[in-house]
Image (cartoon, grey):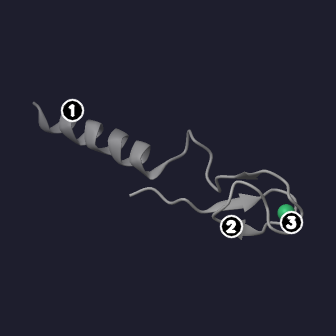
Amino acid sequence: MRTQMRVCREDRTYTLRDACPRCGSPTVAPLPPRYSPEDRYGSYRRRLKREGAK
Ligand SMILES: [Zn+2]
């Protein structure tokens, strides 16, 4: 499941829109693309698989 919540980098306003309703600045996803729960679980599962494949 992927959240569509975005946040304004100027005033930290959370919104579902691409632009902040307060100041009109472009909003960004709260989490950086490289740091996602899916990646964490992926590496964790790969490590488990490697350790369990003896
Ligand atoms: Zn804003």
Left-right relation of 30 to 47: right
Q: Residue 25, relative to residue 11: is it above or below?
A: above
The amino acid at mark 3 is Asp
Q: Is mark 3 within 8 Å of ligand 1?
A: yes
Q: Earlier in the sequence, mark 1 or mark 3?
A: 3
Task: Between label 1 and label 3, give the one nearer the viewer.
Answer: 3
Residue at the spot of label 1: 50
The disc placed on residue 15 is 2
- Structural crowding at the residue carrying mark 2, measured as other residues with C-alpha within 10 Å and reported as few (<14), some (14–19) or many (≥20): some
| SS label for mark 3 | loop
Q: Earlier in the sequence, mark 2 or mark 1?
A: 2
The image quadrant where one finds the C terminus is top left
Left-right relation of 53 to 1: left
Viewer-side residue, 3 vs 32: 3
| SS label for mark 1 | helix
Left-right relation of 39 to 45: right
Name the residue: 21% across, 32% down. 50
The residues bearing labels 2 and 1 have C-alpha atoms spaced at a distance of: 41 Å
Left-right relation of 54 to 34: left
Q: In the rendered image, which quarter is residue 24 located in?
A: bottom right
Contact (Cβ within 8 Å) of mark 2 with mark 1: no
Residue at the spot of label 3: 11
The residues bearing labels 2 and 3 have C-alpha atoms spaced at a distance of: 12 Å
